[in-house]
């Protein structure tokens, strides 16, 4: 992945929402003006389809046929186009290794019930699929082989998150989603190492499946991301947004809560499943000491100083008010340079006004 380091000592980058965080440079004044307060949202009312589809007879038959390389499936039940649309949300959760589905589908009535057709990408035939599935499986196993023996589920998920962010190039040419392709699949991410958010999310989920860690995919705001269950609790994961292509891997969106999620995106009306993600014990910055409920200048500067010999240091705050105070102090009043090991030259930072976080690059 191409790495770009910014050397302007006081350059700020505000991260926005979308399939990729889109950044713009902001020159700070002596006093940092507060960003627009995030909207307060509640969990949306959506249709969860996992139980409904897995209880049917036609959905397992459809999945089996797709895995066997057949575009058409005839089932004895009445199936409508909206049912197939729901199935497409569920298939990616049950079989993230199915990379060959296109965006065209239909369900029609036949004598014995219904015929379902989901067109494949690029007219793949069975030989293509078998060969590429083997490539995908080997690529996933290669990632898994790098996980140190004895790793906890947290450490396994973190390793996979970092590996995908470090080894995948975000395909900016495909962000418009005007067509379907391998760039939106687990194959694009793991084999071709070039993908959009769907590829990151499906690759992460596929590897979690192989590791026996519960996970899944959710969609909304023209974006895909994951949930994962660690130590008995659900958390959100967004590998795409932690791969900013401008430096080291970030961890703002590794094991985060619904509170942060709803500041940054909405949900599509159909989902396989939406978990409750309220715990913070395994959130990366909480677990690693970079989360501050309030702005304590000494504690924050001490933490930054402890990490000043690394390439970057991430910090996050528990409220907008604490974040605003940190911006005004660390950046507006240049208190950042009071931290041990932080010089006046070669320091830059990324500010994320929706996550209440700063990533300081040394």
Image (cartoon, rainbow, N blue to C red):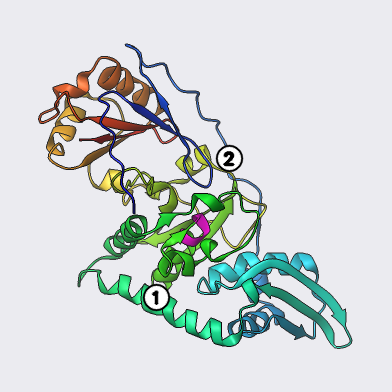
Where's residue 146, x and y in %?
Answer: 25, 70
Residue 152 screen position, x and y as percent: 26, 65
- Front disc: 2 or 1: 1
From what the image shows, is residue 225 above or below residue 328?
below
Q: Is residue 324 magenta?
A: no
- Residue 250 relative to residue 18: left or right: left
Instruction: Specify the principal SS of the magenta part.
Output: helix
Q: Is residue 130 depicted above or below 195 in this figure?
A: below
311 on left or right of 358: left
Q: Is residue 264 left or right of residue 33?
A: right
In three-dimensional space, the C-alpha distance between marks 2 and 1, rounded to whole angstroms, equals 33 Å
Q: Residue at x 49, y 64 (%)?
A: 202
The numbered mark at residue 210 is: 1
Residue at left 48%, top 80%?
133
Crowd band around label 1 with a 10 angstrom C-alpha radius: few (<14), some (14–19), many (20+): few
Mark 2 vs mark 1: which is more N-terminal?
Answer: 2
Disc on res. 42: 2
- Residue at 51 percent of width and 37 percent of height: 263
Q: Which residues are magenta?
A: 196-200
Q: Secondary structure at mark 1?
A: helix
């Amino acid at each position: 992945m191409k790495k770009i380091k910014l050397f302007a000592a006081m350059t700020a980058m505000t991260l926005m929402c979308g399939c990729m965080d889109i950044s713009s440079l902001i020159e700070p004044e002596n006093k940092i003006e507060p960003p627009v307060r995030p909207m307060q949202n509640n969990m949306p009312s959506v249709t969860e389809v996992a139980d409904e589809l897995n209880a049917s007879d036609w959905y397992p038959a459809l999945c089996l046929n797709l895995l066997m390389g057949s575009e058409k499936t005839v089932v004895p039940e009445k199936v409508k186009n909206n049912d197939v649309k729901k199935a497409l949300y569920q298939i990616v959760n049950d079989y993230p290794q199915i990379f060959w589905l296109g965006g065209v589908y239909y369900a029609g009535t036949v004598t014995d019930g219904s015929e379902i057709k989901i067109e494949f990408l690029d007219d793949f035939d069975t030989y293509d699929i078998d060969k590429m599935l083997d490539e995908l499986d080997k690529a996933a196993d290669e990632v898994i082989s790098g996980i140190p023996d004895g790793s906890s589920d947290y450490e396994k998920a973190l390793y996979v998150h970092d590996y995908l962010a470090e080894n995948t190039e975000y395909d900016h040419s495909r962000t418009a989603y005007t067509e379907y392709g391998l760039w939106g699949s687990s194959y694009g991410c793991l084999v071709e190492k070039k993908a959009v958010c769907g590829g990151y999310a499906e690759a992460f989920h596929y590897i979690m499946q192989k590791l026996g860690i519960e996970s899944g995919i959710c969609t909304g705001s023209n974006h895909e991301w994951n949930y994962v269950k660690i130590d008995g609790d659900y958390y959100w994961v967004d590998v795409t947004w932690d791969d900013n292509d401008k430096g080291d891997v970030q961890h703002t969106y590794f094991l985060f809560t619904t509170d942060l999620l709803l500041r940054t995106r909405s949900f599509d009306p159909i989902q396989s499943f939406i978990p409750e993600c309220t715990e913070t014990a395994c959130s990366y910055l909480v677990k690693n000491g970079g989360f501050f409920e309030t702005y304590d200048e000494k504690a924050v500067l001490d933490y930054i100083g402890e990490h000043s010999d690394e390439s970057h240091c991430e910090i996050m705050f528990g409220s907008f008010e604490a974040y605003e105070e940190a911006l005004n102090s660390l950046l507006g009043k240049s208190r950042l340079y009071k931290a041990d090991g932080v010089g006046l030259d070669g320091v830059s930072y990324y500010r994320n006004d929706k996550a209440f976080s700063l990533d300081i690059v040394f």
